[in-house]
Amino acid sequence: VQLQASGGGSVQAGGSLRLSCAASGRTSSYHFMGWFRQAPGQEREVVSIISWSGVINYSDSVKGRFTISRDNNKMTVYLQMNSLKPEDTALYYCAMKNWGRSSYDYWGQGTLVTVSS
């Protein structure tokens, strides 16, 4: 499985960006896809997860501002990020794991999001 993330960039606070993550290869029908981020000097953290059936979770820090969605036909997951804050600045990664796995096995290359005040 390969994951290709795109859509990062630089915006001012209050702006918006949309990230995309396209999966290719032999993917399981029952899986979770998610977005994680890592800011300089900090641990990687989960941003949002969506299951194969559409169950969604968000971290408290992005609830109400970010929206995750997926297009199963395109095997692509999106992260719409609105009302961006400087603290959202990070390298964003998409990842995938199959149902029953405890950790994410497949990771994209990361896309940088920079939010200036």
Image: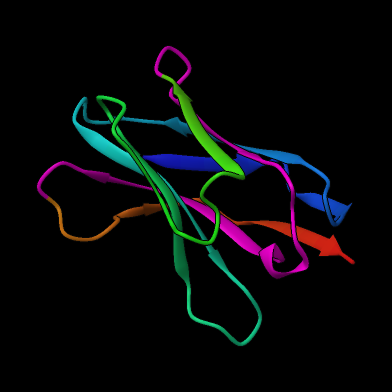
- What is the x, y in percent for residue 68? 50, 36
- What is the x, y in percent for residue 59? 44, 57
Q: Quadrant of residue 26?
A: top left
Total count of labels: 0
Observer-nearest of 11 and 99: 11
- The residue depicted at 75 percent of the width and 61 percent of the height is 85
- What is the x, y in percent for residue 43? 48, 80
- Left or right, 16 with respect to 88, comes to right
Residue 108 painted magenta: no
Report the span colored magenta: 72-100
Q: Vertical placement of 79 versus 86: above or below? A: above
Q: Quadrant of residue 25?
A: top left
Q: Vertical placement of 56 versus 76: above or below? A: below
Q: Quadrant of residue 29?
A: top left
- Left or right, 48 with respect to 78, comes to left
- The residue depicted at 86 percent of the width and 54 percent of the height is 10
Q: Vertical placement of 27 versus 86: above or below? A: above
On-image quarter of the C terminus = bottom right
On-image quarter of the N terminus = top left
- Left or right, 109 with respect to 56, comes to right
- What is the x, y in percent for residue 7? 72, 41
Residue furthest top as drawn: 73
